[in-house]
Every structure is written in structure tokens, then in C-alpha cells.
Amino acid sequence: MTVTTDRQERLRERLGSSAKRPDGIPKVQGSFAFSSDLQADGMVWGHILRSPHPHARIRSIDIGPALAVPGVHAVLTSDDVPGDKTYGLEHADQPVFAHDVVMHIGEAVAAVAADHPDTARRAARAIVVDYEELEPLVDAEAAITAEPIHPDGNVFAELVIRHGDPSAVGEVVVEGTYEVGMQDQAFMGPESGLAVPDGEGGVDLHMSTQWLHVDRDQVANCLGLSHDKVRMTLAGVGGAFGAREDVSMQVHLCLLALHTGRPVKMVFTREESFLGHVHRHPARMHYRHHASRDGKLVKIEARIVLDGGAYASTSRPVLVNAACFAAGPYDVPNALIEGWAVRTNNPSCGAMRGFGAVQVCFAHEAQMDKLATALGIDPVELRLRNAMKTGDRLITGQLIAGTAPVKELIETCSAAPLPAEDPDPDPMALPGGAGRTADRSRVRRGVGFALGFKNLMYSAGFDDYSTARVRLENGVATVTCAAAEVGQGFVTLVQQIVREVLEVDEVVLAPAETASIGSAGSTSASRQTWMSGGAVERAALAVRARLDSGEHEPLEETYEHHHPPTSPLDADGQGDAHVSYIFAAHRAVVDVDLDLGLVRVVEIATSQDVGRVLNPVQVVGQIEGGIAQGVGLAVMEEIVLDRGVVRNASFTDYLIPTALDMPEIAIAALIEQPEPGAPFGAKGVGETPTISSSAAVAAAVRAATGLELPRIPIRPQDISLAASPV
Amino acid sequence: MSETAAFRLRVNGTERVVEGAWIGESLLYVLRERLGLPGAKNACEQGECGSCSVLLDGTLVCACLVLGASAAEREVVTVEGLPNGSGELTDVQQAFLDEGAVQCGFCTPGLIVTVHDLLERNAAPSDLELREAISGNLCRCTGYGRILAAAQAVVAERSGSGRSQRETPS
């Protein structure tokens, strides 16, 4: 292959092509450096001692026995934290180490550095902690009025949305109470990192994370250092899905490195990973839908309680999202939504793909099906009659100014051909797989349909921005941006954007780090394509403009890209809080073994609102992967809690979909209506595949069984032990 | 570490010596931390996720479940040592790139070893056989669609029948 052909091939990898990932070759060869692969000379290993109790008072901690273990370099507790003793994304209430009270199982109590990871584990076990167990508060509903379990109180946030006429009443009313269990992000690459002291009181931290700059700020505050003394570099990230938005081991690693004067590496075990990051909020939601006889929504009332667990994390914005999107992507003239996010002694909850929209989607879509039954209208038709469109208003009063192709999504997804029923299926294709289904005559097929939507980017007055620098020298473009590549393919998109704008074939990505550039914001909220993609585009356009005006290389431009300002919600939950929305439709087909309660998801058809497809393979990858997490929440995944104690902190007991669990994914349509104001017209596609796929699967299982099934994940016993399965 | 072991094993065709290893170390730890081969990944350390899949005397195993010392005098093949002919990549590795099977990439090395192993034993797996064969390898990013497409592309390529049935957008 000639050099010319190589160049032509790369230049073809512009926007709209399935350009290849620049990190693909090392990833398939096993040489890509994930955060758990890092090494340094003189390195020692860190380990964290965690609370075995969900709520307890610490009477005393004796680190002496751990210090006596040969090979131990440091044992640290709360007394060794020189700066702020707590951190947090919104509200700094999470202790680096529990001091007098532990608030959830797995809370960090002490940390050890030793010459071997097993030495560190054994030394941690040798620390003697005298706990006085306290009654755990584990009921979110009760927490609203219960005696405070924390000086900051039990209510992280409460809000109300009053929209339209509160006295409006529909001719037909349906109601229901719905629950969503606690889902884990369960990324594959466990939390890990390497902290290297610089010998001058500062530290370099190589870490898998979603937002380098905000990690850096929290770490520096806890270390009592100026922010420039802590330099963070993104290490290879083995998936994120929200769980790396909060600080996990960052402060502990840096403390150990500064105390020992050595590089310190730490890798969470899977159990620690389950205990050491936030989860999706469990939700309890009571809904009442009012409609006219001809199937127009009149009013939606909802009461939403989210269990935020022990510490604040992002509970407040998750609640804002849950409330804003509580009515679903429908034209709803009147609404009353009340919501609480509360503190309990359960594990902390925060960001996970969908961020509050997933929970309410399960409820509002179950309600739409219930309403369709009450009205005698086909559920798809009912959704069409109420579909949100450009020019409608959210229940927050905000005008939908951008694209909202809900009708097109419904029409294309519902029109997808249904999969044929195999009269003699391979035993492996039966619910539960080979050897599980007892009686094939007791297998029923069901079909369910669901719509979901959410906001893109940060909302409600947050000044959301990203920074990027493009340098053109000797025909090579170098891009510097601190956006976290977590697997989604932002690195591919950067190359595509710069090739498009500058028409150069060689585009190099500088390391993502805090020292060389400003914040890119978080890799979350489906925001990096718009925010950092936009920053890269505008920096490249500025270079292009100078080229076009006759200037010569080297040329360098930096651009800080802010999205249009938004407003917080007012006391009635009204306000222009969001910038843009993304919508999706899912149709699930399931087979259910009525006797055993086992579900096989046969197929999910989907139509997705994407604005514009910038990389077809990557868009499909987000859709298929997002649906997998939605399927998991619908029928498999839940962190099982017993009075605050996690009972299944392993991949043996917390089951995520395997290749056998995954259905065929049929992409009925990618609706390309360029979004005004969005760079390239593209919408982020990370979250919507997850939002309504769970609801669609639940609807399909209801259709197959005739059961109400008001809770996900749907467990076998919810079907097999139900009073009267069909 | 008082209880240590010294042993030899063959890794990717090369004789390697391990000295001073704690006897409780897994083969995964020995490969990653003592022999400089990070391709096998540590995601669960209890044999559930397949990220550490390697071949031990030709049998697919989770390296996290094998004691390092018990691999003494045995033959280990990791993703770093898969036969790739004269090229930079094996056909499976190339197909993973071409079909978009790689996102975060943490499960990728284990899956590549597993798919190589499957196709050695079964050159023409059915869709369900393929799904069953990789069901011991968890992936959280992809939903497996592009991974199945990659494996089918290799099957088609090796049998000389051209493109796979599972279409990947181009």
C-alpha cells in the first residue's frame, strides 16, 4: 500500500464515515495502557479498609497491628487528611475517611500502602476498628420525615413542578405505583490509578475518570494543596457510564504517595468497585394520568422519591431530571410533579446513563399502556396522539425550539417487521437457556413499546463548557483537550472533525491532562460530541481562518465552547432549564416461561433521534450497548440490599447481560434532523438507548403474562409466584 | 512475603523464569505484574468475566483462577502471543477493528483469545454457538452486536465466502 493511498484513506475518514478508532490497534493487541496497567519504579500498592456496617459509630481505630506487618509503608486514617476532610461533586459531604460515624457499607475507614497488593490487603485486615452499630435508615420514604442521620439532614433535594391548571381533571384516570431497583454501572475496568509524588510537595495522578479538572479540584482541596500542585492525566478508562463521575480512590492514592514518597498504585477488586462507587437511584413513583375520552392527555400527577443513599453526590440534579422528564415525550397541558431525593444508610447513588430519566420512563410508559387499555386505544396510537413536537412546551414551561421527531420515531419503530416465532426453537434460545424451560407450551410471547427522552448537556443554570486547542505544524494537526475518552469514541470524532475542517490527514491527540489545558467538562449527559466536539471544531475553524488569510504554520488556536445559558427552575418548577433534547423509541419482543418466570428478550427494534450521524459504527455501538444496559435493568440487574448491606457485590451474583442474554437489535431508523445550534447538527447518542429500552421490555413481559409488574428488574418470582399468571 | 516460589513457564513461546513470587499469586498477577504482559485484564478475579482469558496448554482458562505456580513447566499463550502470521494483527484482531467491536477495550483481549480458541475448534459456529462460546466474556459497552459481527466476518473470511451475514454500517 502506498503512502498516497494511506493518505487518501484517512482523508476519507471525515464526518459521516465509520472512521476507525485511533486507539483500536493497541486495544486489540492488549498493549493499551488502562489505569490498572500502570507501573513505576519503586511503586508500592494501596488498599482501602472499608466499613462492614451500613451505619455505626467508630469508637476507636488501632492501626498498630497493620504498621507491624512487614512490607507496610503507611497506614492512614482521617487524622492524616491535611485539607478538607470531605469532598463531593455538588456538596462536600463525603468523608475521605469516616471519622466518627460510618454512613454506608463499604465506606472508607483507613488506607494502607505496602510492597505487595496482598500485603496491603492483609495489613488492612489487621487494623482494629471498634464499631458501635447503629440502626440503619434504609427506607427512602421514611427518611423524608425521620430523625436526621447526618448533620446536613436527610433531604438532599425536593422540588415541585406546577404546570397549567392544577384543578384540571380528565374523563379517564389511571394510576399506579412503580419501583426501580438499584442498578450498577458495572464497567469492566475496575477503579484504578497511579499517584506519583513530585518530590516538591505536589503529586501527579494517573487515573481513569470522567472529569479530570473537577477531580483535580476535589483532590487538591482534600490534600490542602493549591490546584496546580495536583496534576491529573487520564489513564486508559475501562468504561464509565456515570460511575467515574465521583471521586473514588483519588484522594487516598495521593495521600499514600505523599506520605510514602513513592509511586502508589491501587486497583479495586470487583467487590470494592461495587461498594466504592455510586449507583443508579432506586425510585418509588406514584403516578396519576388524566385523559379525555378521545385519548388526549389532560394532566399528569406524580410523586417521585429517589433514594440517594449516604452522601449527596449528584442526587439533586438527578431529581431535577427525573421531574423535568416525568411526563414523557408528550404534549401535556397540566402537570403536578413532586419529588424528593433523600439520604439513607444505603450505598450512595449518583450518575448513571440516563440520569433520572430512566426511572420515570419506566413509570410514565407503564401509565401510557394502562391508559391505552382504559381507553380501548392501541398503545402505539395513544402515543402518536400525544407525541411531543417542536413548538410544544415541556411541563417546565420551556418551549421545545429544536428538533423533536417523536412522531417519526413512533411510526418507524412500530412499523419494523416483527421477528418470526420459531415453532421448534433450539433449547438454547428458550427462556433461561438449555435445560431450564420445563414446558414449551407454557412459553408466551409478548410485545411492548416505549418512548423516552432527556436533555443533552448540563442544565438549570450550570455554566457548561469545554476547552480545546488545535495546533497545525508541518501539516500535522495536534489536538489538546481534557475530554475523557471512556470508550465512546470521542478520540475518533476528534480526528474526523479536524480532517473535515483543516483537510489534513494526520491528526494527533495530545494526552488528556489538567496541566496543559482548561476543563472539557464531564464525559456524561451525552455532552462531549456537542461540547468538546464543538470546541475542537471552533479551534480548528480559527486555525483554518488564519490559513485562509495567508498566515503560515505553525498556527495554534484555543477555544472555550459554552452552550447557551440556561436557568434554574423557579419555585413552581418552571424555567428554561435545558438546551436540547434527544428522543428514542424501543419495541421489545420477549418470550416468557410462565412457570419458571424466566424471560428471553428476543428482539429490540429501535428508532433513535440522532440529529446527524457523524460515525455510523460508533452510533450503532452506543445504541446496542445502551440497550444492553436497559435489558439488564429490565430483567436482571439489581444491587440487592438487606438493611443496607449489599448482598451481591460480585459478577457471580450481580448479573449483567451476556451474549446469550442479548436480543437481536433491529435499528428501524436513525432520524437525521439536524439540531439547530448543535455542532454539525449532531445530538449525543449515549443515553437514549438505555432510557426506554427497559420500559419496552417490561411492557412486553406484561403483554406476555397479563401481570401488572410495577417494578424493575422483573424477577422470576414476580412472574412464577404471581397469583394468577395467564 | 515469607512463602515464595520460583518456577519456569513458557509464555508465548518464550521460556520465562519467575522468582520470589508469593505462592498465592494467580497466573494473572504473574503475567501482568511479574512478566510485563498486561494484555490479560483483571475485572473480577473470580472467573466470571473472561477478561483474563488465556490459553494454558491449549485450553482456554481464566488466568485469575489459575495459581501462578501451578503453571510451572506449562505453555501459556496470551493475547500478546496470538499467531498473526507475518502481519501486525491476527484476522480476529483486524475484524474487531473493522466491525467496530472495540469501545473501551477492556474486555477486548479476552474476547479475542476466546474467539481464536472457538474458531480453532469450530470453524463454522452457528449464531447460538458463537453466543454461547463468548458468553463467558462480559462486555459492558457494546451489547455484543459488533463483536458477533467481527467473529462472523472472520468465519466468512476463513471459509472464503466473503462478507458476514451480520451487517455493520460502513
Image (tube, rainbow, N blue to C red):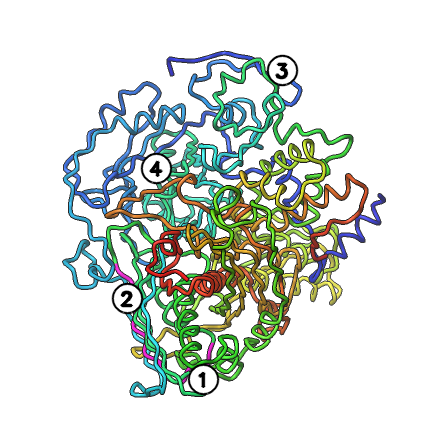
Instruction: Locate residue A95 relative to residue B125 in the image: left or right.
Output: left
State the extent of the magenta-drawn residues as a range.
A330-342
Left-right relation of B127 to A706: right
Q: Which chain does the numbered disc 3 sit on? A: B
Instruction: Look at label 1 and name its amino acid.
Output: Gly
The mark closer to the camera, 4 or 1, is 1
Query: Going 20% across and 33% down the picture, which residue do you hit?
Result: A129
In three-dimensional space, the C-alpha distance between marks 4 and 3, rounded to whole angstroms, equals: 40 Å
Q: Is residue A339 magenta?
A: yes
**In terms of depth relative to the viewer, which is nearer, A369 or A125?**
A369
**The residue positioned farthest toward the top in the image shown:** B6
Which of discs 1 and 2 lies nearer the camera? The answer is 1
Residue A425 horizontal side relative to residue A547, left or right: left
> Tags 4 and 2 in contact by the CB under 8 Å rule?
no
Q: Which residue sits at x=14%, y=37%?
A: A59
Q: Secondary structure at mark 1?
A: loop
Q: CA distance from mark 4 to mark 1?
A: 61 Å
Work out whether residue A555 or residue A38 is closer to the camera in this orientation and state it: A38
Q: Residue at x 43, y 68 (%)?
A: A459
Q: Quadrant of residue A343?
A: bottom left
Which amino acid is tagged 4? Leu
Cα separation between marks 3 and 1:
74 Å
User: Is residue A89 among the parts visible in the rendering?
Assistant: no
Q: Is residue A200 above or below residue A572?
A: above
Query: Which mark identifies residue A340?
Result: 2
Residue A407 in view (yes/no): yes
Does the magenta portion include A101? no
Residue type highlighted by circle 2: Trp
Mark 1 lies on residue: A295
